[in-house]
Structures are given as structure tokens and as C-alpha cells.
Image (tube, rainbow, N blue to C red):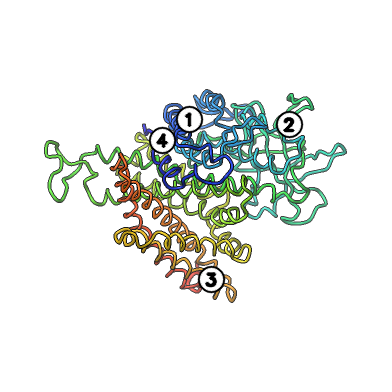
């Protein structure tokens, strides 16, 4: 059975050597000294490796079952969920006013990676609750916050988001779920939603559904969509649970992966709901959840890649097959371990360099969220908004590819369920689809985010990269060659792609949109290149300062050199594709496909 070890040392390196969070002028960061963050990460690491990870295979093989309208989660899930709740992990970065610990997002993200890597399906129950609670926190009335948040923060009650319907996914303006106003200010919600993660289960006393619906007589299309709080059990004025609401489970979806999460068809039959935010402004409120969820899904791509890599690495060290081409490296054994072979090394280095670069990218993004929320830094808010589709789309696309590479290390054993590697690939696959499919993320990046605020935020990103190179170049010729020059070249490719869109996208929008996926991946590579340059610099400085663990920092530099030499040059290929425009993409008539 696969295992998981939380990468606490690497997280500490990113938090303190690279991001230097304890020195940042963000409220709450002054408390994040290395001893404090280490204590949190070590405890989370124990919980995830010892309690949650062993249930990953259980959830995959057992799945959830629906009996008489009740969904039962896999064996062990309820007990593990109680331990998570007892430890206060569900409210780590939520306000103290509602029972949370008010930790910064950057700590929540580090802990969240561990939970997702250990057991993605299990972690989704609390993850969806966190998103729903965040939407109520941002858009709810004081009464709604007081009623729902304390028990959602503790996960005594869990939450969901209900968007998709059988006939509409991305185009939510087509939805048919209706909301009929009532004399007491509530609404009667009727309709059907599909693909609802954690829609029904046996681990919480109530489930608070956030449901998109159209108020009768409202505007057509997306402008007529509102968001409603629809509890499984109606909540009485004194906070106690009342009658069962008009919401039920039609079925549990049969899925490729995340079997331990109850993905449900939800039926609303005049269920009592309460408007969250303003009438016909449902998408504004829902995007509080969606943006948080997209960052969390990007983290899932990293998490599945990392746990798959951990297991592939151990297998590569143990599996004996063939001899090293340069001569036997284990002459006392029948064959050498497969990690001696260059192609296996290439695969493992692809996985390692991606996971460590993606971790830094996610945590950097979390610091921007903290700056935006805790310091009201509008520039940070704009930059993380620009990068959100990159984090979600690039990290899940490549994260999935890395689970396939990890599976491949096992050869035929990777295809056999006994070894458990296929689960990482199957579970990672959904991250490319939900919370906005990756093609939509690419369109959002090129079609909306590049031009946002007059292009201010993408220019800020370019300036950030230029400033980093300018401030740190010229100190070490080898470091410049290995890190700074590749980053500079990749950034130039990204700027050239942006210029192509400006010059050709107005005349023919297809020229921009046909290259959107390549641009998203190019942007992702530049971001990871920037992270690796920052990590390489931190490692170089640590070694120069006489760091006690020289092997860790030397390994970090070697891994960074690999990414800069073998992965970052992909920007040139993406640029070439982008500059071919839309002609070859759109050449065929529909009938000729």
C-alpha cells in the first residue's frame, strides 16, 4: 500500500529561506517564526501520514454507498474526521470570532497540501466547507454568519457549492433551478444539480448547501442568477435543527477517481433557502468560493504529484532490473536498482523539480492572498487574480502528467491495483476538470486577466521578474548561467506571446484564443522558473553562510538546475505554437472532423 510523508523540511525552507515570511509586513506574519511553523507542520504531518493517508486506499476501494436516502462514507472516515475536528484543523485560517484560529492563508495552504496528498477524497469534505464558509463570511448578513459559521468552521456542519446542472456546466446562464420568493423573506428552491462534491454524507449533523438559482421574474441569462443558503435541516431561531428541508440525493455519481467523496445528484423540491448577498448577484458571491477553490485545486495537482513521486522514488531504489550502462553499481545483487538508469532518473527529476517548484508557487500565491486580505494590498490582489488560472490550470495539467510518470516508474506493477499507483492518477484527473475546466482557465487568462485594469497586473509581473534578475545578477557567473539567463529568456518568450496577442488578437480573436492553452503553460513555466531562481539563490546563500545541512541545499541547487535546463526551455515551443495563430486550428469545417 502506498505511503505518505509530509515534506515539512521543504515547506520550512520555502516559508523561511525563500519567502522569509517572518520578516514580511503582513499582519499576523510576525508570529510565524520557524519554531512556531515547525510545530504546526509537524503535527499536521503526523495526522496526515498516520491517520488520513492509510484511509486513502480504503476510500478508493470501498467508495460511498447510498441507502434509503443516506450516504455512508468509507470505513474509518467518520473517526478520522472527528480527529481532524478535535485538532481544530478545519478552522486553522478562519476568524477567531467564529471559532477559528485566524492563521494566515500561507499556513493553511501548507497544511492543506499535506491533507490533499494524504487523502484527496477525504479532504474535500472539509475543503468544500471552508469555501462555503468563506462565501458566507464575505457576503452574508451578521445573522447568517452567527447562525452558520461557528458550526461550519468546526465542521460540525459541512458545506457544498451547487452550480452545475445536467444541461449546463460552464454556461451557468442556462440554469433552470428556480427560486420563488416567500412572504417571510425566504425562497423556495426547486431544481436539480449534478456533480455536487460532499453533497450528502454521514459525518456531520447538517449540510449547508450554497445553491445558484434564478429568482422568478429576474433578468435572463447569467445576470439573473442569485445565490442561496439551503440547509439540509432547517435551522431554528435558537440555532437548533428543525425539520428536514426539501433537498434529497438522487444518486451518487460513478466516477473515475475520488471514490471516497460522495459526489451527488441533488434534488431540490421547494426547499427553503435564504438569499446570500444581493439579488441577481449570485456569481459575485459564488466567485468567492470559486477563486478559493481554484487555488485549492491547483494545490491538489501538486499534492497528487508529490505523493506519487514519493512512492515512485522508493520503488526505483528497491526494484532490481538490468545493470547501469557504466558498470554494475550493486555487484552483490542480481541486478542494479532501476534508479541507476538515466531515463528513470529523468522521470524522477521531472517529478521532483515540478513538485518542489509548484510548492513554492502555491505558497507564494498564498502570501499574496494574505497581503490582499490582511493588508488590503490591491496590487497583491490583482496579481494573484492574474495568476489564479495559471495556478489552477498549469499545476493540475502538469500534476496529472507527473502522476502518470510516477506510475510508469513501476512498469506493469503501476497498472496493477495491488500497488495503488493508479489511484493517484485517477484522483488527479478530476482536478483538471472541476472548478472550471482547464481550457476555460486558459480562456479566462488570455481573454480577461491579461487586460484586467489596463494590463497593469501582467506588467507588474514582468517588472517583478526583471527586478529580481537585475537585483541578483552578476554575483556569480555560474549561477547567472544556470538560473538567471534561462529565466530571462523564458520571460522574454512570455512577453513576446503577450505582444502577439495584442497585435493579432484584436483583428482576429481566434488568434489569441487558439494559443491560450500554450500561454497558460508558458506562464506556468515562467512562474516555476522564478520560484526555482529564488530557491536557488536561497540555497546558494545558505551554503555561503556555512549551513549545517549542506546536502539539502546542494540537492536544491541541482534540482533547480535541472528544471531551468530541461523544463523551462518549453516556453520557446509554446511561443512558436502561439505565433502560428488560429489558421491551422480553425481550418477544418465541422463536417470534416
Residue drawn 45% across the image and 38% down it: 117
Question: Which comes before the other along the chain, label 1 or label 3?
Answer: 1
Question: Which comes before the other along the chain, label 2 or label 4?
Answer: 4
Q: Is residue 558 above or below residue 182?
A: below
Q: Which residue is mark 2?
A: 147
Q: Calculate the distance from the C-alpha at mark 3 to the C-alpha at mark 2.
A: 48 Å
Residue drawn 77% across the image and 42% down it: 275
Marks 4/3 in contact by CB < 8 Å: the verdict is: no
Q: Which residue is mark 4?
A: 6
In this rendering, position of residue 507 left or right of residue 33: right
Q: Which residue is mark 3?
A: 501
Q: Can you give x and y, in whole percent of width and height, for residue 12 in the image?
A: 42, 40
Q: Nearest to the eye among marks 1 and 2: give it.
A: 2
Question: Which comes before the other along the chain, label 3 or label 2?
Answer: 2
In the picture as drawn, the residue positioned furthest to the right comes out as 183
Q: Is residue 501 above or below residue 383?
A: below
Question: Which comes before the other along the chain, label 4 or label 3?
Answer: 4
Q: Calculate the distance from the C-alpha at mark 1 to the C-alpha at mark 2.
A: 35 Å
In this rendering, position of residue 320 left or right of residue 495: left
Q: Quadrant of the N terminus?
A: top left
Residue 62: numbered disc: 1
Marks 1/3 in contact by CB < 8 Å: the verdict is: no
Q: Nearest to the eye among marks 4 and 3: give it.
A: 4
Q: Nearest to the eye among marks 4 and 1: give it.
A: 4
SS under mark 4: loop
Marks 4/1 in contact by CB < 8 Å: the verdict is: no
Amino acid at each position: 500500500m502506498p505511503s505518505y510523508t509530509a515534506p515539512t523540511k521543504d515547506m520550512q525552507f520555502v516559508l523561511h529561506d525563500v519567502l522569509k515570511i517572518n520578516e514580511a509586513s503582513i499582519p499576523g506574519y510576525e508570529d510565524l517564526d520557524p519554531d512556531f511553523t515547525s510545530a504546526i507542520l509537524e503535527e499536521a504531518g503526523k495526522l496526515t501520514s498516520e491517520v488520513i493517508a492509510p484511509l486513502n486506499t480504503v476510500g478508493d476501494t470501498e467508495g460511498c454507498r447510498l441507502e434509503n436516502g443516506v450516504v455512508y462514507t468509507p470505513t474509518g472516515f467518520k473517526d478520522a474526521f472527528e480527529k481532524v475536528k478535535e485538532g481544530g484543523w478545519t478552522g486553522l485560517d478562519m476568524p477567531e470570532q467564529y471559532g477559528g484560529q485566524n492563521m494566515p492563508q500561507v499556513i493553511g495552504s501548507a497544511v492543506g497540501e499535506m491533507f490533499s496528498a494524504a487523502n484527496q477524497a477525504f479532504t474535500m469534505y472539509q475543503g468544500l466547507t471552508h469555501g462555503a464558509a468563506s462565501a458566507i463570511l464575505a457576503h452574508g448578513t451578521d445573522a447568517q454568519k452567527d447562525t452558520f459559521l461557528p458550526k461550519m468552521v468546526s465542521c460540525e456542519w459541512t458545506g457544498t457549492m451547487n452550480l452545475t446542472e445536467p444541461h449546463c456546466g460552464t454556461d451557468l446562464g442556462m440554469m433552470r433551478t428556480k427560486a420563488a420568493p416567500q412572504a417571510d423573506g425566504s425562497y423556495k428552491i426547486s431544481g436539480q444539480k449534478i456533480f455536487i462534491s460532499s453533497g450528502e454524507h454521514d459525518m456531520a449533523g447538517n449540510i449547508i448547501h450554497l445553491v445558484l438559482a434564478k429568482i422568478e421574474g429576474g433578468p435572463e441569462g447569467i445576470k439573473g442568477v442569485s445565490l442561496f443558503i439551503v440547509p439540509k435541516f432547517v435551522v431554528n431561531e435558537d440555532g437548533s435543527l428543525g425539520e428536514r428541508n426539501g433537498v434529497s440525493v438522487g444518486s451518487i455519481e460513478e466516477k473515475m477517481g475520488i471514490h471516497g467523496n460522495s459526489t451527488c445528484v441533488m434534488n431540490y423540491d421547494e426547499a427553503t433557502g435564504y438569499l446570500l448577498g444581493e439579488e441577481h448577484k449570485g456569481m459575485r458571491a459564488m466567485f468567492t468560493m470559486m477563486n478559493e477553490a481554484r487555488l485549492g485545486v491547483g494545490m491538489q495537482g501538486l499534492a497528487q504529484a508529490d505523493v506519487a513521486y514519493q512512492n515512485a522514488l522508493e520503488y526505483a531504489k528497491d526494484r532490481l532490473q538490468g545493470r547501469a550502462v557504466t558498470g554494475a553499481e550493486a555487484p552483490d545483487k542480481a541486478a542494479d536498482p532501476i534508479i541507476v538508469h538515466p531515463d528513470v532518473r529523468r522521470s524522477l527529476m521531472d517529478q521532483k523539480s515540478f513538485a518542489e517548484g509548484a510548492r513554492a508557487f502555491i505558497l507564494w500565491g498564498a502570501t499574496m492572498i494574505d497581503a490582499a486580505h490582511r493588508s488590503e494590498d490591491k496590487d497583491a490582489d490583482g496579481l494573484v487574480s492574474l495568476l489564479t488560472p495559471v495556478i489552477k490550470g498549469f499545476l493540475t495539467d502538469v500534476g496529472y502528467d507527473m502522476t502518470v510518470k510516477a506510475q510508469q516508474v513501476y512498469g506493469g506493477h503501476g497498472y496493477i491495483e495491488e500497488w495503488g499507483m493508479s489511484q493517484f492518477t485517477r484522483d488527479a484527473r478530476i482536478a483538471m476538470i472541476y472548478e472550471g475546466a482547464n481550457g476555460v482557465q486558459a480562456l479566462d487568462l488570455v481573454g480577461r486577466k491579461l487586460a484586467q485594469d489596463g494590463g497593469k497586473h501582467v506588467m507588474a509581473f514582468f517588472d517583478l521578474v526583471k527586478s529580481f534578475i537585475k537585483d541578483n545578477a552578476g554575483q556569480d557567473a555560474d549561477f547567472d548561467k544556470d538560473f538567471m539567463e534561462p529565466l530571462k529568456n523564458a520571460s522574454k518568450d512570455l512577453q513576446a506571446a503577450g505582444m502577439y496577442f495584442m497585435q493579432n488578437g484584436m483583428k482576429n480573436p481566434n488568434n489569441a484564443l487558439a494559443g491560450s492553452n500554450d500561454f497558460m503553460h508558458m506562464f506556468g513555466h515562467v512562474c516555476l522558473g522564478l520560484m526555482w531562481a529564488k530557491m536557488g539563490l536561497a540555497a546558494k546563500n545558505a551554503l555561503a553562510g556555512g549551513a549545517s545541512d549542506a546536502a539539502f541545499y546542494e540537492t536544491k541547487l541541482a534540482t533547480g538546475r535541472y528544471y531551468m535546463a530541461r523544463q523551462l526551455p518549453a516556453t520557446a515551443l509554446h511561443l512558436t505554437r502561439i505565433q502560428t495563430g488560429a489558421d491551422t486550428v480553425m481550418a477544418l469545417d465541422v463536417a470534416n472532423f
